[in-house]
Amino acid sequence: MSKQTDYNVVAATKYVANGKRNAMTMDIERIFGENTFGLEEMKSRLPKSVFQSILATIEKGDPIDSNIADTVAIAMKEWAVERGVSHFTHWFQPLTGSTAEKHDSFITPNKGGGAVAQFSGKDLIQGEPDASSFPSGGLRATFEARGYTAWDPTSPAFVIENQNGSYLAIPTAFASWTGEALDHKIPLLRSMQAVDKAARRVLKLFGVKGVHRVMSTVGNEQEYFLVDEEYFYRRPDLINTGRTLFGTKPPKGQELDDHYFGSIPDRVLSCMLETEKELYRLGVPVKTRHNEVAPSQYEIAPIFETSNIAADHQQLTMLTLQRVARKYGLVCLLHEKPFAGVNGSGKHNNWSIATDTGMNLLEPGDTPHDNAQFLFFCAAVLLAVHRHQDLLRAAVASAGNDHRLGANEAPPAIMSVFLGEQLEDVFNQIVKGSTKSSKQGGLLGLGVPALPHLPRHAGDRNRTSPFAFTGNKFEFRAVGSSQTVSMPNVILNVIVAEALDHMAAQLEKKLSGKKKNKQTFDSAVASVISGVIKEAKPIIFEGDNYSEEWHKEAEKRGLLNLRTTVDAFATLVEKKNIGLFEKYEVLNKTEVHSRYETWLEQYATTLNIEAETTLTMARTMIMPAAVDYLNELADTLASASSAGLKLAGVQKMAKSVGGLVDKLHEGIGKLEKAAAHIGGDDALAHAKYMRDKVLPAMAAVRDAADELEKIVPHDTWPLPTYTEILFVK
Ligand code: ADP
Ligand code: MG
């Protein structure tokens, strides 16, 4: 029996449904949030005044009163200890994009030689992880070597369970001692404040009363692959880089579209159910699951929440998907492009803004006045996207996402907005008729009839658009599957805040001095919207974003096409962008530079790991297999010739294997040479070098190897094939 068959048998039979039904434990009402120290738990455990103080912080954004920290800490510890918790950690989000934790035990020895569990307000509020190994893009050199973590009371602490014990995780921000943000959470919180302030300025002009806070809301659809761990372990590329660096297209791919929304295989469903159960217990409101387009690809989506909580929960979702998968002999791949020639994974970022009174500002209303307000906010988003295409593109840039954006499965690197026919038409009418409107005064007062009720998810949803209006929210589709959603939402919040301020200022100007009757207000609103749409019009596109014509058309319209991560990151430090971040106090110049440096370095490092892995696999796995086969053919020819046979076919085969071995050898040599250099001392030069010299050299090695995979005997080929990885479930 061949090696491959052995593995197939192991993989396919490894999962044995145990026959016991655990379904009864999925009592959603009982388990939801049971592993979080949320509001209910706090209310029942804290003195009333302390609870009120915490509530004011969580709901109104009041600063945390440090005097209550000890009381909260004791209650939190008691709650945790009841759940078998022995350790706690500040849980934070450094610039790597993943989460970080360092566990400390509650243990405090006492005099009698015993020990008690202790946890103080100080432990809760502030921690000091050794920050020196986290990327800071030069921030630490300029400032302090150490960073500190600070409790975020707006995001509930939670318990992570293991069969041998549990620990308490406390969501925290991570900053330098001089106050620079070293993480993803701080800018997100700051950007939420920016959009809050700007949106309230607009609402005031519209005469909306009783709103104390406006919050950005986010719901992320997460795509991922589940593959059998046997195959994962046998692929150094998957282990090291999260994607396959070799592999020919399988005879059957996704062409039949038989996987999308298909029935979910048993083992996978079991895994999903446990994942969802764990997420419920952590208070993550996951809602939807289905098969995605590619074989072995799936999606999970929650009900939306405020950005900060959604971002924390998104991280928990990725962690839980990966942890639970292992229990089922599966590995969850979050990489944007694990398999060439097969669809990659994204993470649609559904975004809106809502008031604390429950009004979704991107939902068309029922009255003309509400509609005018909706159109105003909607126009602000258009303006924001048009003015800041570069930042949106940078927000989704990564080495992984470069394989996906523009690859005819995900939106191209060109930003544009899909509005849907109806809404686009309404805006067009405003542009045409705004001057008339004050005369007519009628209906919407904006020169258009009252907005027809826009169905959520109108039938013509454009799947190729990077940024689509979907009835009551915008869906940013270019986000990569493995990335933190913080940065995309920081950018969305800050650019929309700026657009709202810009429009509010115009409206204020038009209204100032005038007697504010309904007519002047309506015509002022119409003229602001009209001006904005005229400016932002080039960003609106309803057609096929994958088409060649669109690329030409977009160029004519003057839209940016930042093809690669390097092009996109380079724009971060442009003066206008630093100015924007500084104006809204989301990032200062140093913080922007630190991100620029860190992310370029991360890009280069990712490619370097890929290059080294390519080399190792090519030299130690693929080349030996190819040479073995060549040897076998040569032996056959030698014995054939001594028997007086010619075997022309075998001769040809030996020739083509020999040719490919040479090609592979040459490719390896070139890649070795390219990877031996870094191409400059600054981060940008280094990243460019990796993109322009190393990446193509890797591709050449892969080409030769993938050709060999097609002809080298299956039982000699050292790597599991795409067919096995994608179709054994
Ligand atoms: P799709 O057809 O794109 O999968 P869904 O209705 O399933 O659409 O919604 C996708 C995501 O959008 C969900 O996570 C949902 O919670 C989120 N969403 C819905 N309304 C809002 C909103 N107002 N703000 C942010 N996200 C939202
Ligand atoms: Mg979807």
Image: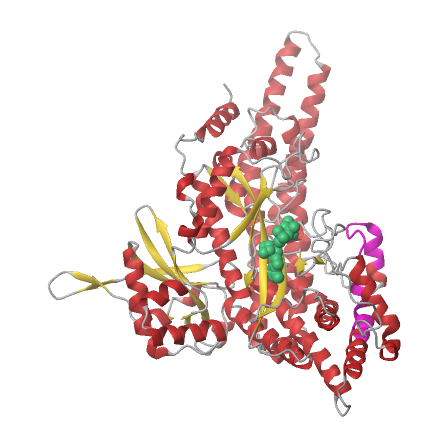
The residue nearer to you, when weighing 105 against 710, is 105
Describe residue 685's horizontal placement relative to residue 66 as left or right.
Answer: right
The residue drawn where x is 28% and y is 54% is 84
Q: Name, please, the residue furthest toward the top.
A: 643
Q: On screen, 566 above or below 498?
A: above
Q: On screen, 77 above or below 236?
A: below
Q: Find residue 256 and report its horizontal and vertical position in percent.
A: 70, 33
Q: Name, please, the residue furthest toward the bottom.
A: 513
Query: Based on the displayed image, in which of its 4 quarters is residue 324 positioned?
Result: top left
Q: Find residue 183 and report its horizontal and vertical position in percent.
A: 50, 67
Query: Based on the displayed image, in which of its 4 quarters is residue 558 positioned?
Result: bottom right
The residue nearer to you, when weighing 128 against 67, is 67
Is there any visible trace of residue 24 in the rendered image?
yes
Q: Find residue 198 and report its horizontal and vertical position in percent.
A: 63, 77
The residue drawn where x is 43% and y is 31% is 17
Q: On screen, 707 above or below 603?
A: above
Describe residue 484's horizontal placement relative to residue 449 as left or right.
Answer: left
Q: Find residue 470 and report its horizontal and vertical position in percent.
A: 69, 57
Describe residue 45's horizontal placement relative to residue 440 as left or right.
Answer: left
Magenta region includes residue 544: yes
Where does the magenta region start and end? 530-553
Query: Based on the displayed image, in which of its 4 quarters is residue 326 positioned?
Result: top left
